[in-house]
């Protein structure tokens, strides 16, 4: 029996290990050559411009068997072209000129005031009126008005020769208007509105008067949104009532026209079971007509009394309207003697 211990062989000198090491080393060299970074020095035999090609992925040594060459790799995908930036959106409103715009300094009538016999627009600079193109008027009205234009250094006026229609009038200044120094008119100040009436209630009347409820009619000269009226109108017991200043509950709904449609100018105020007569009807600040162009012409603290127990003016309207003659019609809550009216009325 041989008791000699077998000699322990050095694993690093074993032929199998050396062959594997040689294969791994060869693959590593191949991988290093294949992952040469862009812009580096090309290897032997590389074609000019090869540094501009995207690098191929590295080959792992573990996938290569000893004595085999690495498998050829597919060419890298072509780089996708850069997406073009979307074109910049152009603003619909041109930027103001270097010298700024000429602006509207004021109008007659003032916003919310009644149109009488003229419309005047004042500018903050002198205007070059000789720049009129093709006879285009300085102001265009819808509906059309009858009258004549007059211009001054910094204003344009339209003198009416016929009574204007009893509706909101849309006006628009001409685009050719410019100042003496050549500044164009501010496009935001070209449109404006005027009206031959003040935006405030023109009539208050009784629609129904019963013990269980009272329905009051209220009328405006132009259309009003129902929800806006509900927000701004209030009713309180008057100082002469049994409960002065107490809120009175009510509902609002449009009146019905003769065509069976909901009215835009007349409304029903229904008060149920109220014992606090008389009442005051008023408005909070901010009520505008349906177009948004007119603010309520209503002095703070003003109210309408219902039922009216004293002489009052129900409404004021234009009658016949000529250059040499103008008729004004007044409607009162009670009969008035003509001689008394002539004595106390001032215009």
Image (cartoon, rainbow, N blue to C red):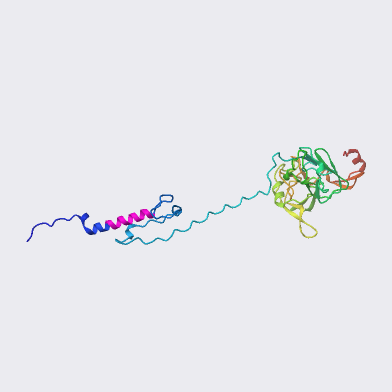
x and y percentages locating residue 140 in the rendered image = 80, 48
How many circles with numbers are drawn on the protein? 0
In the displayed structure, would residue 125 be above or below residue 77? above
In front: 223, or 191? 191
Q: Which of 177 and 82 is in front in this view?
A: 82
Q: Which of 114 and 129 is in front in this view?
A: 129
x%, y% of residue 103? 74, 40
What secondary structure is the magenta-colored segment mainly? Answer: helix
Side (left or right) of 269 relative to 29? right
Name the side, left or right, on which 257 lies relative to 6.
right
> Is residue 23 one of those drawn in magenta?
yes
Q: Is residue 281 visible?
A: no
Q: Position of residue 34 (x, y in %)?
A: 38, 55
State the residue lying farthest toward the left. Answer: 1
Q: Is residue 12 visible?
A: yes
Q: Quadrant of residue 14?
A: bottom left
Q: Choose between 22 and 98: the one closer to the eye.
A: 22
Q: Position of residue 200 (x, y in %)?
A: 78, 46
Quadrant of the drawing holding the C terminus? top right
Residue occupying the point 35% across, 57% down: 60
Q: In which quarter of the image is the N terminus?
A: bottom left
Query: Within the magenta stretch, is there residue 108?
Result: no
Residue 77 appears left or right of 275? left
Q: What stretch is highlighted in magenta?
A: 21-34
Which quadrant holds residue 53?
bottom left
């Amino acid at each position: 029996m041989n008791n000699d211990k077998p000699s322990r062989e050095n694993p690093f000198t074993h032929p199998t290990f050396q062959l594997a090491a040689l294969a791994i080393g060869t693959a590593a060299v191949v991988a290093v050559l294949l992952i040469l970074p862009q812009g580096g020095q090309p290897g032997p035999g590389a074609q000019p411009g090869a540094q501009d090609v995207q690098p191929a992925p590295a080959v792992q040594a573990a996938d290569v068997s000893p004595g085999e060459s690495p498998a050829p790799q597919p060419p890298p995908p072509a780089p996708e072209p850069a997406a073009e930036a979307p074109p910049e959106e152009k603003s619909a409103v041109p930027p103001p000129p270097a010298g700024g715009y000429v602006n509207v300094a004021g109008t007659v009538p003032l916003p919310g005031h009644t149109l009488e016999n003229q419309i005047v627009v004042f500018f903050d600079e002198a205007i070059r009126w000789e720049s009129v193109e093709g006879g285009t008027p300085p102001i265009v009205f819808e509906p059309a008005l009858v009258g004549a234009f007059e211009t001054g250094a910094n204003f344009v006026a339209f003198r009416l020769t016929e009574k204007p229609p009893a509706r909101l009038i849309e006006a628009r200044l001409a685009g050719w208007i410019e100042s003496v120094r050549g500044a164009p008119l501010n496009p935001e100040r070209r449109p404006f509105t005027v009206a031959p009436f003040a935006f405030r209630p023109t009539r208050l009347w009784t629609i129904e008067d019963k013990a269980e409820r009272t329905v009051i009619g209220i009328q405006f000269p132009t259309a009003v949104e129902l929800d806006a009226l509900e927000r701004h109108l209030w009713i309180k017991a008057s100082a002469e009532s049994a409960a002065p200043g107490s809120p009175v509950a009510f509902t609002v709904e449009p009146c019905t026209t003769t065509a069976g449609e909901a009215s835009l100018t007349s409304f029903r105020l229904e008060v149920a079971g109220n014992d606090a007569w008389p009442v005051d009807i008023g408005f909070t600040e901010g009520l505008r007509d349906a177009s948004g162009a007119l603010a309520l012409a209503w002095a703070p603290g003003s109210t309408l009394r219902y039922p009216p127990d004293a002489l009052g003016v129900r409404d004021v309207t234009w009658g016949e309207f000529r250059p040499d003659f103008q008729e004004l019609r007044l409607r009162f809550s009670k009969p008035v003697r003509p001689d008394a009216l002539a004595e106390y009325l001032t215009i």
